[in-house]
Image (tube, rainbow, N blue to C red):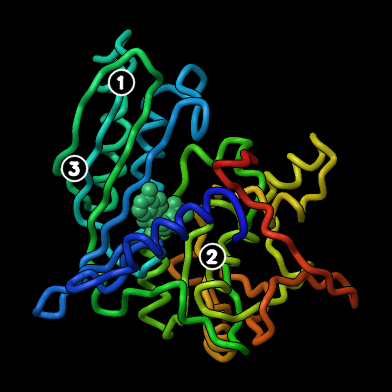
Amino acid sequence: MSAGEFALIDWIRRRAGAGAGAVIEGIGDDCAVIRNRRGTDWLVTTDMLMDGRHFRLDRDGPTAVGYKSLAVSLSDIAAMGGRPLAAFAAVALPKLHAESIGRGLIEGMLPLAEAYRVTLAGGDTNAWDGPLVVSVTVMGSARPHGPILRSGAQAGDAIVVTGPLGGSLAGRHLHPCPRVEEALAILALVPVHAMIDISDGLSSDLGHILDASGVGATIDADAVPIHEDARSESRRDGRPALDHALNDGEDFELCLAVSPADATRLTAGPVAGRTLHVLGRIEAEPGLRLREGDRVTLLPARGFDHFRGA
Ligand code: ADP
Ligand code: MG
């Protein structure tokens, strides 16, 4: 990434280092990985959601916001092949209605926490004259099959996603289903070389795997699973549904690299109740390409960058 949010994160990573001592993976993956002397790997991830950017409190209500702010962090634990254990919620509440918004947030988080057997174990509560900001930190464990990093993709690998993509802004973005059980089921079946969750859009997030692994890839346009929401958004705004699927983001499906033989195993039948899709191949030549018929073009990362906006 040459500019914007990812350039700043790169700079921070160079300044702070990408891990030392017990921190075997610092800045740069979906979670940090902390290894204790007994060989247990702990995962930690934190995400901040802001009114007007990731949700609209007046339209969505605090319960949906609470749900989403926990779900996005659970998704980062899933992306490492981990099991989430504990959550911490830090909130900056608008002074007006602070109490009811605060309760609403927690009412949105707790059923999700219970469903994923995660304990809300702490946080911080503040009120101010600004808009609602919620930051959730989740801790998890990575053993026995994880952690799966972004950096292990190999030329020849198949690229697999856990579900159809695009059009999440039609509403799905508020209630993502973190693919924790799906990741664990996949890992019990085959070795996974690299994995990420699709938060910014397939073109951006697959791009992170390619950058971290020092490889490239070609996506097959015909093989991209397109969500029904992408088709309805396309009818609304005239942008091709494929464009929505490649770039919208907030799908919170997983994107992974596995050997072609293992991809065949994963797509032979449902895994944890879901149909997986092979949509392309990792290649030695850097860059992300799109094949449409016999035309191959460079695919720019056009997913979400917080400095640029959409
Ligand atoms: P994700 O979309 O999976 O949440 P991000 O793109 O937000 O990942 O972040 C990429 C990496 O950069 C992560 O390892 C994250 O912890 C790290 N990161 C982002 N912002 C900062 C920051 N301000 N200081 C330190 N690390 C950061
Ligand atoms: Mg992520």
Q: Which residue, as the protein is rendered here, is positioned at the far left?
A: 38
Some atom of ligand 1 lies within 8 Å of the CB belonging to the residue at label 3:
no
Local secondary structure at mark 2: loop
Which of the two discs, 2 and 1, labels the residue nearer the N terminus? 1
Q: Where in the figure is residue 4, as x and y percent of width and height?
A: 58, 49
User: In the rendered image, is residue 74 in sight?
Assistant: no
Q: Residues within 10 Å of mark 3 (few under 14, many from 20)?
A: many
Q: Which residue is mark 3?
A: 120
Some atom of ligand 2 lies within 8 Å of the CB belonging to the residue at label 2:
no
Question: If the image is split into quadrants, where does the C terminus sit?
Answer: top right
Local secondary structure at mark 1: strand
Q: Is residue 308 left or right of residue 93?
A: right
The residue lying at 26 percent from left, 74 percent from top is 24
Question: Looking at the rendered structure, which numbered label has been put on residue 162?
Answer: 2
User: Which mark is nearer the camera, 2 or 3?
Assistant: 3
The residue lying at 32 percent from left, 74 percent from top is 147
The residue lying at 48 percent from left, 17 percent from top is 58
Q: Is residue 240 left or right of residue 164?
A: right
Which of the two discs, 2 and 3, labels the residue nearer the N terminus? 3
Relative to the observer, which residue lies in front, 58 or 151?
Answer: 151
Q: Is residue 66 above or below residue 44?
A: above
Q: Which residue is mark 1?
A: 93
Gap between marks 2 and 1 measured at Cα: 35 Å
Local secondary structure at mark 3: strand
